[in-house]
Amino acid sequence: MEIFSEVAKEQEKSLREEWEKEIKETYEKKLKFTLPQYHDDSGIPLKYVYEPQDIADTPLEMPGQYPYTRGIRALGYQYMPWMIQMLHGYGTSEETRKRSDFLLKEGMRGFKEEQPVILIEVDPPTTVGFDPDDPRAFGAVGLGGPSVSTLEDLDSLLGGHDLSKTRFAPNTRFTCLPMLAMYVVYGEQRGYKPNELNGQSQNDALTRWITTDIGGPTPSTQFKLHIELIKYCTENMPGWNHMNLCGYLYGETCASPAQEVGIVMANAVGSIEAGIKAGLKPDDFVGRYSSQVHMGMSFFEEIAKLRAWRRIWAKTMKERFHCQKPRSLQYRMHVHTGGSSLTMEQPLNNIARATLHVLASVLGGVQSLHTCSYDEAIGLPSEDAVRTAIRVNQVIQHETGVPNVSDPLGGSYYVEWLTNKVEEEAYHVMNQIESRGGFAKCVEDGWLRHLLESQVLQWRKQIDSGERVMVGLNKFRGEEEEEVPPFVLESEKSAKAAVERIKKWKANRDNAKVERALGDVKEAMEKYDSIEKAGILMPTLLEAARAKCTLGEMMGAIFDGGGGRVYTSEYGRR
């Protein structure tokens, strides 16, 4: 649609010529100023000023209208504030529950501030399927999250909550399927049906395989678990987000904003195509994909990324997968502010960084936010630090007026132009991955890992040379380092408690029933030799959870029936 008249174009031309003359005569000739050339983090060259001609071909659009560049709702935060979802966890499940209660008291909430949200990180053994009493878990139990291996652990985390009104999101990475089985059975024992539960599974099958070296399932095994979970939730748990497309880890490994979008979209395409092979119709399951988006310091580029991402998603779902339901076309975003932006040096500077992350996210129209605490580059966040992170959200929400207008930067010559350019670059990355055989192939042959390692090396060189400035790290360093007391975790005590608990759990059950249940899991996994057979594994895992099998035992049976573990590092075991 033509939005500029011929008269306006002539005025623009005249103004631009005057501006260019001023640059040449004053800055270049008189002041002898050498004009710098700037690029954003995606490598897009930037002009010094943007004008109507830069967005002349950009179609008019309103919030809540396809392709949702300006937001997925006609009214955004005026109707519903973004959710404040703080990923947390450490030590035992009781210690993590204490932190959950603290965060809920301070303002962590889900939809319309009425819904408790429990977004739990777990420890590394739980991530890959080791119980705390497994010798391979030694030294890692309770670090960065609690050990969650039994129904008792879930009750310690969630006892007393109305599960139909609580959003539970365990960040379990490789063990999403048995964790979901445990949660369904836990809910069942408390009188809840699967269709009454809401929350999400991380279930990003292959992203974790790229970025983790601690022995996850083989890519083919993990992908089967991924599709199994999607199929079960589609058919039984309409309120559960069965897939969380994780761009955060790519951002943390220095992928550019456009690369993050392109890689995640290629991942989504592969997942949806597999869902179709498993017998699902896109409109029946695509609407339950959610996301974990990285937020970095390239302020306007990150805003443009969010806007471009919604547009790419909507077009891809409509044009490629022929989705018709609005929910299938609307990409819902949860932002995790960038931990890689934070520094141990002068850690209070991180409050300013987190504030800019939240502001960019809100201006970009996200649905929920985890805000990193100022001390996360030092260790586990303290209560003071996480309270401050929540307050950053609340100040922006209640004191700035920013949420009063939907897409307040819509129509900005620069932001609209940059949205178009990020979209263009993201499609380039997406097409590059598809030309190499698709996302799964690029994971298995190491191409994506090599790309990310190259990005990390480039970032390191820029920091070391001073080309990229991080205040307090490589510039504006003080003579005396700021001291922020680290949060102290009694890890040995927590680990001992977790080990003692699981030993008691195993001693008070019918172990013959356990063995039969695990045998059924192994047998189902052996029969699960193609995506088309998705749906045969979850029933056996539910029975295993009812038999009091632990998460580690269920994952062990899956490995026994499906090919075991690999270590992704070229220096590790395979």
Image (cartoon, rainbow, N blue to C red):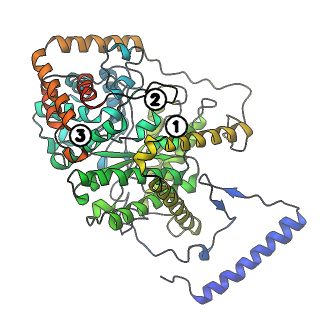
Identity, as a three-letter code, of the amino acid under mark 1: Gly
**Is 422 situated above or below 490?**
below
Identity, as a three-letter code, of the amino acid under mark 3: Asp
Q: Quadrant of the C terminus?
A: top left
Q: What is the C-alpha distance between the residues marked 1 and 3?
A: 39 Å
Viewer-side label of 2, 1: 2
- Quick one: SS at disc 1? helix
Identity, as a three-letter code, of the amino acid under mark 2: Asp
| In this rendering, position of residue 154 left or right of residue 542 | right
Q: How many marks?
A: 3
What residue is shown at x 34% (from left), y 64% (from top)?
320
Q: What is the C-alpha distance between the residues marked 2 and 1?
A: 19 Å
What residue is shown at x 30% (from left), y 32% (from top)?
175
Upstream in sequence: badge 2 or badge 1: 2
- Residue of label 3: 529
- Residue of label 1: 339
The quadrant in which residue 135 appears is top left
Mark 3 neighbour class, 10 Å CA radius: few under 14, some 14 to 19, many 20 or more:
some
The quadrant in which residue 490 appears is top left
Mark 2 touches mark 1? (CB < 8 Å)? no
Upstream in sequence: badge 1 or badge 3: 1
The quadrant in which residue 564 appears is top left
Question: In front: 56, or 451?
Answer: 451
- Residue of label 2: 213
Viewer-side label of 1, 3: 3
